[in-house]
Image (tube, helix red, strand yellow):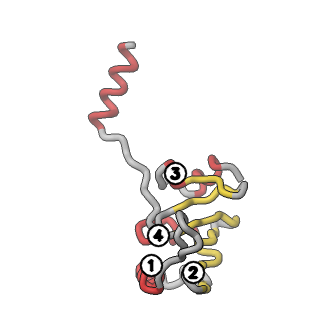
Amino acid sequence: MSLLKLKEQTCNAFAHAAYQIIDDEPIVVGTWCRCAYIGNDLWDVWLCSPLDLRSGLSKRRINSIRSRIAKISRRPGPYRELTGEGIYLAMPTDIFLRSRLALGIPKRRAVSPLSGTRFTTQTTEA
């Protein structure tokens, strides 16, 4: 799967920097997670520290993320917890998109109406 198809699966809801290719696999990277699309509108969500995988997350941080996702949906998918990390296996896409804030995935910025009009006037004048 390419990054373009991954953006289509997420409705282009995340910032450009969130989409990355790591180990020849396109994934979505947040502050507290790495998420891979597995097909059939399902995601594997790995709760970890993406910048330093060896350090892991604290138990308190993992429980905080889990409780915020549980408030969004009662069935986020099967969950496994390891030391310093947690894994949601087969999280549905709609729950994944709604739990963006809890996972620390940056959202896509919208162009303001003022900037949009400035851009169109600049391109038509040039």
Q: Are marks 3 and 2 in contact (CB under 8 Å)?
A: no
Element marked by disc 4: helix
Task: Describe residue 88's horizontal placement relative to residue 102 as left or right.
Answer: right
Return the residue nearer the eye: 61 or 19: 61
From mark 3 to mark 2, how far is it between C-alphas?
A: 25 Å
Residue on which disc 3 sits? 12
Residue on which disc 2 sits? 86
Vertical placement of 101 versus 73: above or below? above
Tag 2: amino acid = Gly
Residue 118 location (% of width, % of height) = 30, 27
Tag 1 or tag 3, which sits nearer the N-term? Answer: 3
Residue 88 location (% of width, % of height) = 59, 78
Q: Are marks 1 and 4 in contact (CB under 8 Å)?
A: yes
Residue 103: assigned label = 4
Element marked by disc 1: helix
From mark 1 to mark 2, how far is it between C-alphas?
A: 10 Å
Q: Are marks 4 and 2 in contact (CB under 8 Å)?
A: no
